[in-house]
Image (cartoon, grey):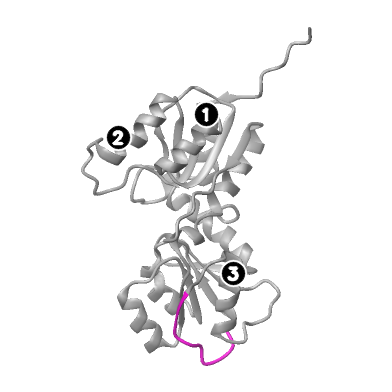
Amino acid sequence: MRRMSAPPSIDRAALLAACNAELQPALFKDYGPNGLQVEGKPHIGKLVSGVTASRALIDAAIDAGADAILVHHGLFWRGQDGTVTGWMKERIKRLLAHDINLLAYHLPLDAHPTLGNNAQLGQRLGLVATGRFGEQELGFIGQRADGEAFADADVLAWQLEHVLNRPVTQVGQAPEAIERIAWCSGGAQGYFEAAIAAGAQAFITGEISEPQVHLARECGVVFYACGHHATERYGAPAFAAHVAAQLGIAHQFIEIDNPA
């Protein structure tokens, strides 16, 4: 009888080394640890990617037969009390019970020039970056890839809603056609002033806070809040697929819907 060959697998250290070499986490001052957050089995044949290490994602990854999970939002953040109780206990318990590795990359995944959240978001919106701005140069600024301008702020809003498949919050109107666009995924509303200083006519991010409403109205720069999850759902699967192909292992992206 012909014996079935085992699916390909790699050492955990090889996966971690490949991720770190591509994302260079040591270059970033971040809000939590990047890299391996929970240690699981030493050999990895299937990598699951997702946006956030929620219990729903962990349970879905268990069902999918994952040996490792790669996310943008991990378990540990600056300012936590450090206890493993409640929801934290439940998430970690599942990972340990099934010997699953958890890898998380926050700002390094935002910043990657081709596979990161900002790069992937811009690609889907038909934007090409011509520069960077903001703290740690996480923000991208550029124009439409076809060289055209958006006729007005409402046209750009329609494009955002069409691509992201969700309503967006638009504050302000541009006095002219929009050519220079800045974007930074997730909770980057604090980058708005830097985007204005960089010459943006419009700024795209995930969330908005009270001060940005007034800045948009007073400075004539349109602010678009498109959802934290919606703007950050592209980097993890793009990066994980790239690394999995490079290492010859299986990959699956699991979407856990989040309206925020």
- Left or right, 256 with respect to 187, comes to right
What secondary structure is marked by label 2?
A: helix
Residue 188: x and y in percent read 40, 65
Q: CA distance from mark 2 to mark 3?
A: 44 Å
- Residue at point 45%, 31% (across, down): 101
N-terminal of the two: label 1 or label 3? Answer: 1
Judge whether residue 142 can be spotted in this image: no
Q: Establish if 79 lies above or below 180.
A: above
Is 177 left or right of 219, judged from the image as shown?
Answer: right
Q: Is residue 124 magenta?
A: no
Mark 1 near mark 3, Cβ–Cβ under 8 Å? no
In the rendered image, which residue does mark 3 sit on?
130
Q: Residues within 10 Å of mark 1 (few under 14, many from 20)?
A: many
Please name which of the two marks, 2 or 3, marks the residue nearer to the observer.
Answer: 2
Within the magenta stretch, is there residue 174?
Answer: yes
Viewport quadrant of the C terminus: bottom left
In the rendered structure, which amino acid carries the disc numbered 3? Thr
The residue beneath circle 2 is 89
In primary-sequence order, the first of circles 2 and 1 is 1
Closer to us: 182 or 154: 154
Q: Give neighbour class at mark 2: few <14, some 14-19, many 20+ (Cα, 10 Å).
A: few
Q: Amino acid at mark 1?
A: Asp
Location of residue 46 (image quadrant): top right
Judging by the rendered image, the residue that carries numbered circle 1 is 67
- The region drawn magenta spans 169-178
Q: Which quadrant: the N terminus?
A: top right
Closer mark to the observer between disc 1 and disc 3: 1
